[in-house]
Amino acid sequence: GENVEQHPSTLSVQEGDSAVIKCTYSDSASNYFPWYKQELGKGPQLIIDIRSNVGEKKDQRIAVTLNKTAKHFSLHITETQPEDSAVYFCAASRGYGGSQGNLIFGKGTKLSVKP
Amino acid sequence: DSGVTQTPKHLITATGQRVTLRCSPRSGDLSVYWYQQSLDQGLQFLIQYYNGEERAKGNILERFSAQQFPDLHSELNLSSLELGDSALYFCASSPTGTSYNEQFFGPGTRLTVL
């Protein structure tokens, strides 16, 4: 089945610096790649997603890139702020039907942004 | 606030017992997903219901079961509890049956098995 590996498991940056989190997936049929942010004591919340027909997507300070050949996708956060501190999860799915259509999550990256 | 509610917030019980976790999806959402989150395993998909029918199964133990009722709320039943079942259990909902759409997560139920 699908396996998603996420690195690093922890990341500490200074406020204003950039942060990059990387994920690799094993199922070449995966076509949907969301990123979720989980703040302490809360459930995960979608922050950005990308579909396999797109190589890059941006939303203000957040961007995601996808390399289908390498089965690799990354989250980039620029001009980090203390409120970006949270656990970030990448996920992959085939998108439609069946158990393999459901989200397979990476193990998470704890991002700390120091003021 | 995602609009998904889960009760109870915390649950403490003993090994061998049975518990029921409840989830109310966002208004209008037809799909409910259940996930288990533990420190070493991350977020693991358990099961999905769509409009009252089981849609997909993930890594759900035989001791666990779920259902979705006509009003679309869902319950996750955990029986013969073991220490290793201690975890955060999240419910998520989405408008359709496909994982191509955003899933809205509830605040979770923290289960502690003593």
Image: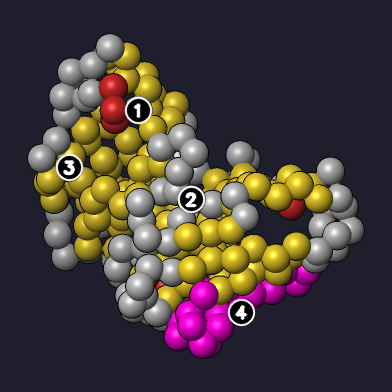
Work out whether mark 1 precedes mark 3 in sequence or the reverse, and give the earlier one: 3
Q: Residues within 10 Å of mark 2 (few under 14, many from 20)?
A: many
Measure the C-alpha gap from mark 1 to mark 3. 17 Å
Measure the C-alpha gap from mark 3 to mark 2. 26 Å
Residue lying at 59% horizontally and 50% vertically, measured from the top left:
B9
Q: Residues within 10 Å of mark 1 (few under 14, many from 20)?
A: many
A73 above or below B100? above
According to the picture, the residue beneath numbered tag 3 turns out to be A63
Residue lying at 48% horizontally and 60% vertically, measured from the top left:
B5
According to the picture, the residue beneath numbered tag 1 turns out to be A85
Residue lying at 74% horizontally and 52% vertically, measured from the top left:
B85
A46 above or below A93? above
Question: Which amino acid, by three-letter code, is at mark 4?
Answer: Gln
| Residue B28 on the magenta span | no
Question: Which amino acid, by three-letter code, is at mark 3?
Answer: Ala
Out of B73 and A59, give the one closest to the viewer: B73
According to the picture, the residue beneath numbered tag 2 turns out to be B107
Measure the C-alpha gap from mark 1 to mark 4. 36 Å
According to the picture, the residue beneath numbered tag 4 turns out to be B67
Question: Which amino acid, by three-letter code, is at mark 2?
Answer: Pro
Q: Secondary structure at mark 1?
A: loop
Chain at tag 2? B
Measure the C-alpha gap from mark 3 to mark 4. 37 Å
Chain at tag 1? A
Q: Residues within 10 Å of mark 4 (few under 14, many from 20)?
A: some
Q: Which residues are magenta?
A: B48-73
Work out whether mark 4 precedes mark 2 in sequence or the reverse, and give the earlier one: 4
